[in-house]
Image: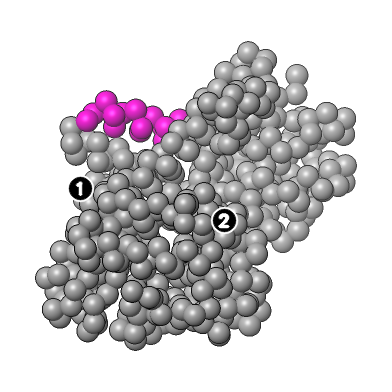
Amino acid sequence: MQIKNICCIGAGYVGGPTMAVIAQQCPHIRVTVVDLNEARIAAWNDTNLDNLPVFEPGLDAIVGEARGRNLFFSTEVDKAIDEAEMIFISVNTPTKTYGKGKGMAADLKYIELCARQIARVSKQNKIVVEKSTLPVRTASAIKSILDHTGNDVKFEILSNPEFLAEGTAVSDLLKPDRVLIGGDTTPDGEKAVNALVEVYANWVPRERILTTNVWSSELSKLTANAFLAQRVSSINAMSEICEKTGADVNEVSRAIGMDSRIGSKFLKASVGFGGSCFQKDILNLVYIAKSYGLDEVADYWEQVVLMNEHQKERFTNQLISTLYNTVSGKKIAFFGWAFKKDTNDTRESAAIRVADNLLNEQAKIAVYDPKVQAKQVYADLDYLNTRSDEENKKLLGVEQDPYKAAKDSHCIAILTEWDEFKTYDWQKIYDSMLKPAVVFDGRSLLDRKQMESIGFIYYSIGSGITK
């Protein structure tokens, strides 16, 4: 079966870039990305490619090449579903904030709504592809809805988890380590799997396209993120020991990273991991384990999340302690709000929790991030529901100029590892700050000797503060 028309429901961080690359690499396939959010679709269609709702290096060029040729963004969901042979579901699957599984299980209400809409609209057989991060056996729930509410249409459900990292999503899509496709082992299921394999084979070597049963595919996604997050929490646990003993976590990371059995990736100590997947997927694993009575397994994985939260609290407490145990009325400049560099994604960013902790102490915060807009910063704080929107805006401001953010501040907290921070005139920043001028580097981004020679009191994760 050769696919000629693809629809993707969801124009967010996964759906938009993934479909843009598919469209660019497969000019013979019409790709339509649909979303009910009119503002988001308008941004994807903006003639100014700098205004795309998702910032990823290289994405603007790909969208510019394919959009209008065979890549389309629309709010006409029913039309796109009806015309497509293959439908990707790429909607949000947040952690539940209510009911059974609150705080751990994935909320699948948007997935179910998509399935019911697909069933209602479809008149011909369809291949439905799970692209969102989903708990194990979600495919069976989707298939049950489609089979029982459809118009005698046959549906094949595939699992095709994404393994994208914000900031490198385009390169991850163009040159993936692997593409994983899970499906039923029935003849029809194998035909559906092969149809998706042929799409990716337009640019991905076939030896990197792995096919499994659908359950293994779903679980592989959760497991991969859990293992990566575990490494971050492990090195962050060591960063605290390093600060107490006089060791340097960067030297420790380099030493153990050269062990071929361990490798160097995800051994960078920081104020904590963020993003849309790590915490959500680990908590999902915890919930699954508890559901099967595997309490020890659940406790083991939950500790990774607890270690991550501890790192944010530790960073905050050390900052307050350094500023003479009070930050009330003191200006703290935040350099970075995104959860990592080269993205405007702020989901679960460490900056949010650190800011909330400092605002609880009546600190005044000035935020600068090169890609995150003010409305997103306030939305992130409002979501915590710690205080009113008016209180947040009274205590926290967002600046478009890092030098303005730093002026008259007591401390600069580096929360995102944007490369541009290393190029700033730090002498100029030092001269504009109140003294003693403190830099709290939550990403070990800057050069300690340079910062100390200027006169800063400098703290770096895993190697402590100026003695």
Q: Please name whichever residue, 183 or 353, is drawn nearer the observer in this view of the structure.
A: 183
Q: Where residue 175 is drawn, which disc sits there? A: 2
Residues at discs 1 and 2 in contact (Cβ within 8 Å): no
User: Looking at the picture, which amino acid does disc 2 mark?
Assistant: Lys
Which residue is farthest top? 245
Q: Can you say which quadrant of the picture contains the C terminus?
A: top right
SS class, disc 2: loop
First in sequence, mark 1 or 2: give its number: 1
Q: Can you say which quadrant of the picture contains the N terminus?
A: bottom left
**Coordinates of residue 52 in the picture (x, y in percent):** 59, 72
Q: Where residue 122 is drawn, which disc sits there? A: none
Query: Which quadrant would residue 400 be assigned to in this image?
Result: bottom right
Q: Is residue 71 above or below residue 157?
A: below
- The boundaries of the magenta stretch are 294-307
User: Looking at the picture, which amino acid does disc 1 mark?
Assistant: Lys
**Coordinates of residue 99 in the picture (x, y in percent):** 21, 50
Labels 1, 2: front one: 2
Q: Where residue 100 is drawn, which disc sits there? A: 1
Q: Please name whichever residue, 98 or 365, is drawn nearer the observer in this view of the structure.
A: 98
**Coordinates of residue 177 in the picture (x, y in percent):** 52, 49
Residue at 57%, 31% (x, y): give it: 263
Q: Please name whichever residue, 339 or 72, is drawn nearer the observer in this view of the structure.
A: 72
Is residue 341 located in the magenta-colored stretch of the structure?
no
Which colouring convention does the figure follow?
one colour
